[in-house]
Amino acid sequence: MALKRVESIPRLLKRSPDGHKGNYGSILIIAGGRGMAGAAALCGASALRSGSGLVRVACPAEVQPTVASFEPSYMTYPLPCDGEGLVDFAASRPVLEKLVQKADVVAVGPGLGESDDVLELVRWAVESAGKPLVLDADALNALAKDVGLVDRLETPTVVTPHPGEFARLTGMTTKLAKAEREPRSAAFAARNANLVVVLKGGGTLVTDGDRVYVNTTGNPGMATGGAGDVLTGVVAAMLGQKLAAFEAAQLAVYAHGLAGDIARDDSGEVGLIAGDIADALPDAFHHGVREQEIDEEEDDVE
Ligand SMILES: NC(=O)C1=CN([C@@H]2O[C@H](COP(=O)(O)OP(=O)(O)OC[C@H]3O[C@@H](n4cnc5c(N)ncnc54)[C@H](OP(=O)(O)O)[C@@H]3O)[C@@H](O)[C@H]2O)[C@@H](O)CC1
Ligand SMILES: Nc1ncnc2c1ncn2[C@@H]1O[C@H](COP(=O)(O)OP(=O)(O)O)[C@@H](O)[C@H]1O
Ligand SMILES: [Mg+2]
């Protein structure tokens, strides 16, 4: 069956004058590992810059002070880790179970690295967390080792693979994943009604198996390490602000690309780094998403 093409951009709910941080999403980010503190920090800061009420970053204890030092506005929680500086899942589980109870959304993956424990962590997130999920990077590499987990997703879940990760998930070559992006990503999303696939790259695709959105924002300056870690935080923030998974993913890729375009207009494509995209998110939401909301409401009144 043909995919329904979606073009209109969803809006964020207007904030109530008496809104408080509990109304805009408590986000739990499980990310980071030796040498990849930055992935957790970019993700956490981006969730905040996209409107989340409260962000908690759980990361291996070895990198927790580093992650904390990047940004005072999120909270950090040290997870017991192994000798490689990666998460020790059995020892971390009690901490994570407490944290997940306080969360509206759980994002897993950036910078976690690859190990059997990361796979156990992803199994736990899918089977026991009971919250909307965003799975990226090493969470997807773990999922690729037990792809049947996808069929057991019981909460809205957005996966955000780049073509290399999508190829691992589906067992196809990166070349094929890039050549047949729409049918391949839609077929994967159709495996589970809770699943939305964001296949990244120029013209990022968002699909739930029935609908597809092709993103119009973004530029090749965003081909820079950490740009995807930023997106993970934005998707989590949109879910935390009560958008359904498809709309959350759609608005996230749109705003993320817009932030990339704002950063590019400022510094050019060559010198653009992921932190510039995170820093431009407020501008993207303020001028690109919120004003659009106001315009549309004015139109409604007329
Ligand atoms: N500051 C930090 O802490 C940062 C930490 N990070 C963390 O590093 C970890 C590893 O993640 P990663 O994505 O770098 O490695 P990996 O999955 O092997 O992907 C590379 C492979 O995929 C392919 N490929 C990628 N994009 C493609 C495209 N558009 N189109 C086509 N192919 C594409 C590419 O294929 P190639 O083109 O080279 O053949 C290559 O083989 C992860 O935890 C992440 O969160 C990073 O986020 C950086 C900042
Ligand atoms: N040529 C491009 N045009 C538009 N966006 C791009 C381009 N290259 C990369 N991006 C965006 O940058 C991000 C890169 O994500 P990813 O590959 O996961 O990076 P990382 O893992 O280093 O954070 C994605 O959102 C992707 O869509
Ligand atoms: Mg990535």
Image: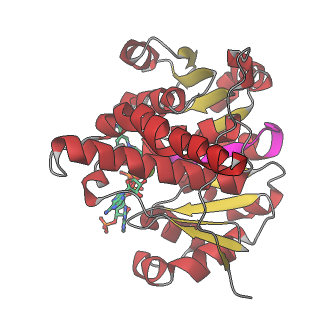
Left or right: where 243 falls relative to 234: right
| Residue 200 percent location from the top left of the image | 46, 61
Left or right: where 199 falls relative to 54: left
Count of numbered marks: 0
- What colouring method underlies this structural image? secondary structure
* Residue 190 seen in this snapshot: yes
Left or right: where 219 falls relative to 282: left
Q: Residue at x 29, y 55 (%)?
A: 223
Magenta residue check for 136: yes
| Residue 78 percent location from the top left of the image | 55, 16
Task: Depth check: give the residue in front, 188 or 246.
Answer: 246
In the figure, 222 relative to 151: above or below? above
Q: Residue at x 58, y 16 (%)?
A: 77
| Residue 206 percent location from the top left of the image | 59, 64
Picture quarter with ligand 1: bottom left
* Residue 114 seen in this snapshot: no
Quarter where residue 56 is shown:
top right
Task: Depth check: give the residue in front, 34 or 252.
Answer: 252
Task: Depth check: give the residue in front, 242 or 93.
Answer: 242
| Residue 61 percent location from the top left of the image | 50, 18
Which residue is at the far front?
302
Q: Residue at x 75, y 46 (%)?
A: 126
- For the record, the magenta segment spans 127-138
Quarter where residue 194 is shown:
bottom right
Quadrant including the N terminus: bottom right
